[in-house]
Image (spheres, rainbow, N blue to C red):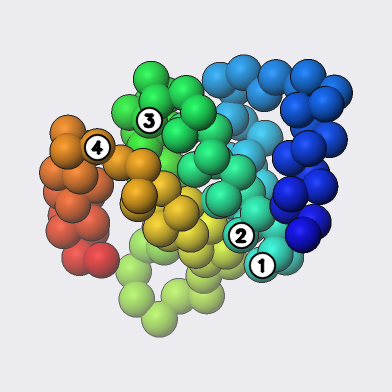
Amino acid sequence: SVAEVAETLWERCAFDFGTDYSVLLTALSHVNFNVRQAAAEALATAMNEIPDTIQDTLSSLFSLYVRDAPVGYNVVDPSWPGRQGIALALNSAADILTAKDIPIVITFLISRAL
């Protein structure tokens, strides 16, 4: 698969993404759904490889969601792709979240009536 080839090339070239996920967070708002999906999966993989980043990454996701939330009802919502990207990221990261992360995510979702 393409993902397997990409991972092999990544490892062979010894790339290190580090803990700056800003590019991935930005890509969650991309106009193209496939880019949002890929960014969400990449973000979950990065958090899985560096678990110490999970809390900060969740905080960033929540902040982005709140920042881009529409104000009022019956409003044209140009920022919906970003919020969809955040939902995709949370879905992709579901399997790697720990017992201490789950209440934080649930509290956020409930507080936003999601």
**Quarter residue 54 falls in:** top left
Q: Specify the amino acid type for callout 1.
A: Phe
Q: Report the mark closest to the observer, 1 or 4.
A: 4
* Quadrant into which the N terminus falls: bottom right
x, y (%) of residue 102?
20, 44
**Residue at image location 79% in from the left, 44% down from the top:** 6
Residue to which mark 4 is pinned: 98
**Quarter residue 43 falls in:** top right
Residue 83 in view in this figure: no
Q: Mark 4 or mark 3, which has the lower sequence index?
A: 3
Residue to which mark 1 is pinned: 33
Q: Specify the amino acid type for callout 3.
A: Ile
Residue to which mark 3 is pinned: 54
Is 60 situated above or below 37? above
Instruction: Determine the CA span between mark 4 and mark 2.
Output: 22 Å
Disc 4 to disc 3: CB gap under 8 Å: yes
- Secondary structure of the residue carrying numbered label 2: helix
Disc 2 to disc 1: CB gap under 8 Å: yes
Disc 3 to disc 2: CB gap under 8 Å: no
Instruction: Determine the CA span between mark 4 and mark 3.
Output: 9 Å
Q: Circle 1: is it few (<14), some (14-19), or many (20+) Cα within 10 Å?
A: some
